[in-house]
Image (cartoon, coloured by chain):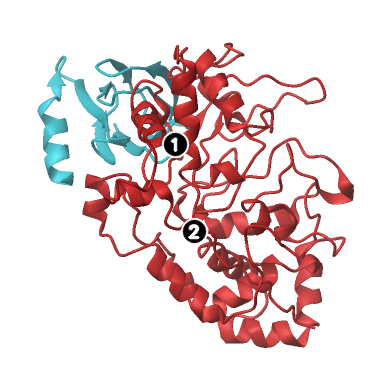
Chain colours: A red, B cyan
Amino acid sequence: MYINRYLICRSALTTLLLCWLFSVGTVDAAASKADPYRPAGMAPIPADNTATPARVELGKMLFFDPRLSGSQWISCASCHNPALGWSDGLPTAIGAGMKKLPRATPTILNVAYNTIFMWDGRAASLEDQATGPIKAKAEMDQDMTILVERLNAIPGYGKAFEHAYPGEGITEKTIAKALASYERTIVSTNSPFDRWHAGNKKAVDDSTKRGFELFTGKAKCSVCHEGFNFTDNGFHNIGLKTLKDMAEDVGRFNQRKVKINHGAFKTPTLRDVALTAPYMHNGIYQTLEEVVDHYDRGGDVKDNLDPNMEPLNLTLQEKQDLVAFLKSLTSQPVLVTIPQLPR
Amino acid sequence: MFFRNLFGCLLFAIAANASAAEFKVDQKDKQFSVSHLKIKAGDTVNFVNGDPFFHNVFSLSDAKTFDLGSYPQGQGRAITFNNPGVVEVECAIHSQMKLVIEVTK
């Protein structure tokens, strides 16, 4: 059971969906563009996978169901744990056979707003991404043909798929669509920063306010961590060290063989960043203070450093202010219900 | 918006000689100023960075493979397209920046 800042209860999934629809607001695109830090409206949804409570409910069952893995022991939630900021609290993930993987589990908070997916951008849509870890030998190690047979043998899933996707059956495609539908409901909620930005001057302290000024000014964080979701969906080599037990990871270069992509990884969201330690694609830092120190140094490995990186010469107070700002991006606690899985 | 950008782009089409022209494509707000550009073999396109951070224009298309490297605001880098074909141009840093250049004979 997940018992942490997230309380566990069972409630109607429709309520969750409605909360999501209202939490993301109805701000139009023009307003969001004028004020990039104002919460965005609903994220784009593919025309062939519009959101319905049945689809979200099915996706949630699949997300929490370990039978999706080859071992029937690992679910999506094993790594994307709601009690750990939709990540796993580990430097790098643990995959099939309890083997340590080379990259950290990214949070899936606000993943619906991303324009490209995975640390190296190898998935173009949430639907494309959804079954990637299931099929990956090192992660959930599942043969999709076997998975489809397994789910077809569970009467409860047959009914749920038919209700969510009438006439489409249980296929790799409908599994992906359902998972994506659920993941689109995992969104950030009203943080102290949002309340301050909306006009409540008492929502954050002075250190946080100074931190935001630094974030968008001297520290240049917003060059990459831009907009309300604090990401440019871009790829940057930020000069991280490779620890002794780590193999070299070329990141985005595997997808686009261009020099600047060597060692570059996707800019993650900073929403709820205080809940998602350790940090960086290789989990090298345990605290936000260490992260800020890294950027203050202008990175450590300069071989193919992103040209936007340079030493910042921050004072101790400025570093503390930046951390205070980052902590102000923590959402209000939300209720995450654990579904009863079909038998 | 598209036609305004296209018009602006064409304004910069300067005949270098009787058979080749130079086009200017801006990079602003993490977008190319046009999403589709039709040029002739031998024409040159100058990619100018109008954003206050680096961009890195490249293509891995069979018709033309190139990497202009990263460069800051105010700078431009040009590339000549000698062969006909469809060239998909992207920014290596900002993957949402895409431009298709159709090179005709």
Q: Residues within 10 Å of mark 1 (few under 14, many from 20)?
A: many
Q: Residue at position x 18%, y 45% from top? A: B2
Q: Residue at position x 33%, y 29% from top? A: A213
The residue nearer to you, when weighing B91 against A45, is: A45
Q: Residue at position x 81%, y 82% from top? A: A153
Mark 1 touches mark 2? (CB < 8 Å): no
Indicate which label's residue lies in the foreground, 1 or 2: 1
Residue A241, numbered label:
none
According to the picture, the residue beneath numbered tag 1 turns out to be: A325
- Read off the chain for label 1: A
Kindly tell me whether residue A142 is visible in this rendering.
Answer: yes
Q: Residues within 10 Å of mark 2 (few under 14, many from 20)?
A: many
Q: Position of residue A194 (x, y in %)?
A: 37, 50
| Location of residue A163 by image quarter | bottom right
Query: What's under tag 1, amino acid-wise?
Result: Phe
The residue nearer to you, when weighing A201 against A34, is: A201
The residue nearer to you, when weighing A164 against A172, is: A164
Q: Position of residue A252 (x, y in %)?
A: 58, 32
Q: Residue at position x 52%, y 53% from top? A: A111
Tell whether A251 sits left or right of A195: right
Residue A78, placed above or below residue B9 = below
Residue A84, placed above or below residue B64 = below
For the C terminus of chain B, the image quarter is: top left
Tell whether A175 sits left or right of B5: right
Kindly tell me whether residue B61 is visible in this rendering.
Answer: no
According to the picture, the residue beneath numbered tag 2 turns out to be: A187
- Read off the chain for label 2: A
The residue nearer to you, when weighing B100 against A201, is: A201
At numbered mark 1, what does the secondary structure look like: helix, strand or loop? helix
At numbered mark 2, what does the secondary structure look like: helix, strand or loop? loop
- The Cα–Cα distance between marks 1 and 2, rounded to whole angstroms, is 20 Å
Q: Position of residue B43 (x, y in %)?
A: 25, 23
